[in-house]
Amino acid sequence: MKDFLIDLCLVGLLLFMINGLLGNFGVQKAMFEQNLEQFEEDIKQQQPITTDYGTTNDNDENALSLVVKKISDGCIKVIETLVLIISNIISTLL
C-alpha cells in the first residue's frame, strides 16, 4: 500500500511538471520579451509609439495546446480507472 501511494504521488508530480513545461506561460513570456525588445528599439530610434502593447493578449488555444489537453485528459482517465480498479481490489481483499 505504501508503494502504491508513493507511485501515485510520483505520477501526480510528473503530471504537474509536464503541465508546467507545456503550459502557455512560456509563449506569453516570449511574446512579452519580443514586444519589449521592439519597444526599446522604437525608443532608441525616436519613433512615435503607435501600438498599445498592453492589449496584445491572445487567449485562443493553439493546436499544440489542444493536443496536449486531450493527451492529459486521456492520461487522467487512465489513472482514475487504475486507481478505481486497485481500490476495488484492495476493498474486496480486506
Image (spheres, rainbow, N blue to C red):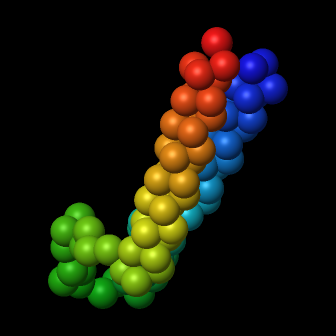
Residue 39: image location, x then y, percent: 38, 76
Residue at position x 57%, y 39% from top?
85
Residue 13: image location, x then y, percent: 66, 39
Image position of 27 with respect to 46: above or below: above
Residue 72: image location, x then y, percent: 50, 60
Task: Name the one closer to the observer, 63 or 1.
Answer: 1
Task: Name the one closer to the observer, 46 or 5.
Answer: 5
Q: How many marks?
A: 0
In this orientation, does residue 23 appear?
Answer: no
Residue at position x 59%, y 22% from top?
92
Q: Residue furthest top?
A: 94
Say whether residue 81 is left or right of residue 15: left
Residue at position x 75%, y 20% from top?
1
Task: Name the one closer to the observer, 31 or 91.
Answer: 91
Q: Residue furthest front?
A: 92
Residue 73: image location, x then y, percent: 44, 59
In this orientation, does residue 49 appear?
Answer: yes
Residue at position x 39%, y 74% from top?
66
Image position of 21 with respect to 64: above or below: above
Task: Name the one closer to the observer, 59 or 43.
Answer: 59
Query: Which quadrant would residue 93 be assigned to in this image?
Result: top right
Say whether residue 69 is left or right of residue 61: right
Image position of 72 with respect to 45: above or below: above
Quarter of the C terminus within the rendering: top right
Image position of 60 with respect to 1: above or below: below
